[in-house]
Image (cartoon, grey):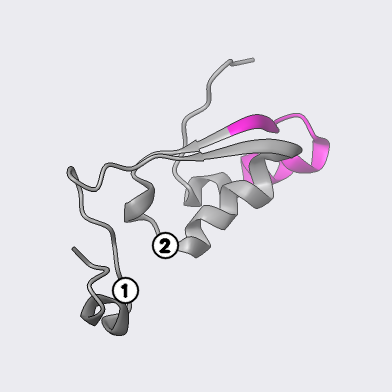
Amino acid sequence: NADVVCATCVGCGSDVFIQSQRNQSLQFALVVIDEASQTVEPSVLIPLLFSCKKHSRLVLIGDQKQLPPLVMSSEAKQMGLGL
């Protein structure tokens, strides 16, 4: 029993999270993703699929002055989205 659980986005796809989601014993009303600008979209989907209740809140946190955004697309970088 815990009030706060910390995990990586990919870690939320582990067997423990998946089994708990099936049992509905480990679902959260709030999911916070820190350093959100350093993630790629597919990895953010993992905690949304395996850790969220139906009406959960998702909070994406990131400081563009601390770490720049991760931009994979060369076209997006050319358009100035890669700081």
Q: Residue at x 53, y 20 (%)?
A: 4
Q: Is residue 3 left or right of residue 34?
A: right
- Quarter assignment of residue 19: top right
Q: Which residue is mark 2?
A: 40
Q: Residue at x 20, y 48 (%)?
A: 67
- Around disc 1, counting alpha carbons within 10 Å, would you say few (fewer than 14), some (14 to 19), or many (20 or more)? few
Q: Which residues are magenta?
A: 14-30
Residue 76, percent from left and from top: 31, 77
Residue 55, percent from left and from top: 75, 37
Rendered position, 77 above or below 60? below
- The three-letter code of the residue at mark 1 reads Met
Task: State the residue lying farthest toward the front.
Answer: 79
Residue 59, percent from left and from top: 51, 38
What secondary structure is marked by label 1?
Answer: loop
Q: Is residue 18 left or right of residue 60?
A: right
Task: State the residue lying farthest toward the right.
Answer: 23
Q: Which residue is mark 1?
A: 72
Q: CB of mark 1 within 8 Å of CB of mark 2? A: yes
Residue 24, percent from left and from top: 80, 34
State yes or no: residue 35 in magenta. Answer: no
Q: Residue at x 47, y 30 (%)?
A: 6
What secondary structure is marked by label 2?
Answer: loop
Q: How many marks?
A: 2
State yes or no: residue 25 in magenta. Answer: yes
- The three-letter code of the residue at mark 2 reads Val
